[in-house]
Amino acid sequence: KTRVFSGIQPTGQITLGNYLGALKQFVNVQHTSDAFYCVVDLHAITVPQDPKQLRERILDLTSLYIAVGLDPTQSTLFVQSDVAEHSELGWILQCVAHMGELSRMTQYKEKSDGKDSVTVGLFTYPTLMAADILLYQSSFVPVGDDQKQHLELTRDIAERFNARFGKTFTLPEVLMLKQGARIMSLDDPSNKMSKSNPNPQSRIEMLDPPDLIRKKMSRAVTDSDREVRYDPKLKPAVSNLLTIYSLSANKSIEEIEHDYQGKGYGDFKKDLAEILVAMLDPIQKRYAEVRNSGEIEGILARGAERARIAAKPTLDLVKRQVGLGSTQ
Ligand code: TYM
């Protein structure tokens, strides 16, 4: 089976953008692949975190993984810092990556912009991400559009390593939706929907109660005129809502455009709110069960065990290739 790897940071509340762009893909490929899904807590600490809250959010995110349909007996669900190989390979890859290529990462530029103190970890973040992926000899990495540049860097690092030290890493490919890889904010369609946006109206969160979803949808910005039509250039807000509708209702955009011919944005947004409520309701119920089941710690312990077994041969090989250690 093909190896798949992906991860999500346990920071803030997981959004509809994370779900449609990434998590849903995790579920879709889990039965046809040997998948590793990681809670990337080491990435989370590149910006300040409250320790108690971080611990809770690790369990929250794992519960959400299961609530959306990831099966811990099929996929390996684990926490990044439980598997020391990530940090070890991360260091080695820091000695392969170049300052210049890391400086060009747009996520780094955005996250460091205007800050007077930025951690070194925020800068070297992509080398740890490369380690996550390459450690498992992953063939496919399901992510949203904002991670594409990091994936390209991962391939560059892997190619450079293979050329210098001999064939070691599988070159991973990005697995990205044609539509939905970049869900935009509800209040501003020129920004991507993000869990770190200070305005909670900008996003739907996976655990938002039905009335809040309805309220956020009714306030979502639209475009001038009143036609429900897909045109990302001229109608970015409505096109974003159409994308969300299409992915959530499993209907094509053309079909939806047809259904709303002659109707206004009001009906369209009301229906979309109900579709989201219906999609999220079973996930939220399952989440509450799982989160309180007392089973999460055990699932993560077994996941870490499996992840270590999968990761160790690659790290051993890397160390041999580079000439590290006393016993190789
Ligand atoms: P993170 O935690 O920011 O986001 C998790 C996943 O959600 C996707 N995503 C979106 N997709 C569509 N529309 C949006 N508005 C949207 N916002 C977020 C992201 O692209 C991502 O797939 N660096 C990664 C975590 C990571 C990782 C990895 C991913 C660490 N190591 C190894 C893959 C492989 C991140 O910060 O994702």
Image: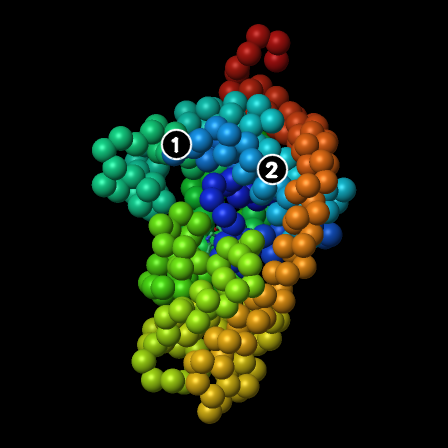
Residue situated furthest top in the rendering:
326
Name the residue that disc number 2 marks: 59
x then y, percent, for residue 212:
49, 62
Task: Say which residue appears at 60% left-offset and 27% top-offset.
Answer: 82
**Amino acid at the residue labelled 2:** Leu
Name the residue that disc number 1 marks: 48
x then y, percent, for residue 327:
62, 9
Residue situated furthest right in the rendering:
73
Helix, strand or loop status at disc 1: loop
Q: Is residue 322 above or below residue 222?
A: above
Which of pointers 1 and 2 lies earlier in the amino acid sequence? 1
Task: Say which residue appears at 53% left-offset and 57% top-offset.
Answer: 208
x then y, percent, for residue 76:
69, 39
The mark tally for this picture is: 2
Which numbered disc covers residue 249? none
Q: Nearer the viewer, residue 129 or 292?
A: 292
Task: Say which residue appears at 37% left-offset and 70% top-offset.
Answer: 221
The local crowd at label 1, few if under 14, some if 14 to 19, many if 20 or more residues have their Cα within 10 Å, is: few
Q: Name the image quarter holding the C terminus.
A: top right
Determine the CA span between mark 1 and mark 2: 19 Å
- Is residue 91 shown left or right of residue 303? left
Residue 2 in sight in this render: no
Task: Say which residue appears at 55% left-offset and 59% top-offset.
Answer: 209
